[in-house]
């Protein structure tokens, strides 16, 4: 992306970066303005215009793009509540993966502590 593009002016030295993290989905005809990071497993709806960084697992829709909720790694919408004043556990109805939701943080819950010596 270039901040002020013109077809007849070459500006390859002015490209801006867009970082799309692992698992993110960008719908057809979505526009991502430069110097943006799309978070891990985020979902950008078709035709959306993204002008700000997108959080991990965020669902972004519209023009301009606004966060409308949170999505699971499988793509299912898990919550449409953007913030939570208390720690909540949300569960995906499709794959049953669980997420921790507190304030503006939405992250996967680990079923077991990471302990190499534990026998399962």
Image (tube, rainbow, N blue to C red):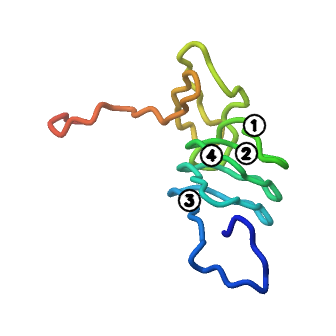
Which circle marks residue 20 in the picture? 3
* Residue at x 57%, y 37% (from the top left corner): 96
Of callouts 1 and 3, which one flags the residue occurring earlier in the amino acid sequence? 3
Of callouts 2 and 3, which one flags the residue occurring earlier in the amino acid sequence? 3
Residue pointed to by mark 4: 54
Residue pointed to by mark 1: 68
Q: Are marks 4 and 2 in contact (CB under 8 Å)?
A: yes
Q: Residues within 10 Å of mark 4 (few under 14, many from 20)?
A: many
Judged by depth in the image, the label closer to the viewer, 1 or 4, is 4
Measured Cα–Cα span from mark 1 to mark 3: 19 Å
Measured Cα–Cα span from mark 4 to mark 2: 8 Å
Residue pointed to by mark 2: 60
Helix, strand or loop under label 1: strand
* Residue at x 77%, y 53% (from the top left corner): 45
Helix, strand or loop under label 3: strand
Split into 4 quadrants, where in the image is the C terminus? top left
Q: Are marks 1 and 4 in contact (CB under 8 Å)?
A: no
Q: Residues within 10 Å of mark 3 (few under 14, many from 20)?
A: some
Q: Is residue 111 left or right of residue 89?
A: left
Query: How far from the left and from the top, in percent, is residue 3?
Result: 70, 64
Measured Cα–Cα span from mark 2 to mark 3: 14 Å
* Residue at x 60%, y 80% (from the top left corner): 12
Which circle marks residue 96 in the picture? none
Could you say which quadrant of the image residue 49 lies in? bottom right
Q: Are marks 2 and 1 in contact (CB under 8 Å)?
A: yes
Helix, strand or loop under label 4: loop
């Amino acid at each position: 992306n270039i901040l002020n593009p013109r077809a007849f002016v070459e500006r390859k030295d002015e490209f801006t970066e867009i970082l799309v993290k692992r698992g993110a989905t960008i719908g057809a005809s979505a526009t991502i303005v430069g110097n943006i990071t799309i978070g891990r497993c985020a979902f950008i709806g078709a035709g959306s215009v993204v002008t700000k960084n997108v959080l991990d697992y965020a669902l972004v829709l519209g023009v301009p793009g606004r966060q409308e909720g949170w999505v699971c790694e499988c793509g299912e919408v898990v919550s449409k509540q953007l913030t939570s004043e208390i720690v909540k556990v949300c569960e995906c109805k499709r794959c049953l993966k669980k997420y921790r939701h507190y304030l503006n943080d939405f992250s996967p819950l680990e079923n077991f502590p990471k302990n190499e010596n534990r026998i399962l």
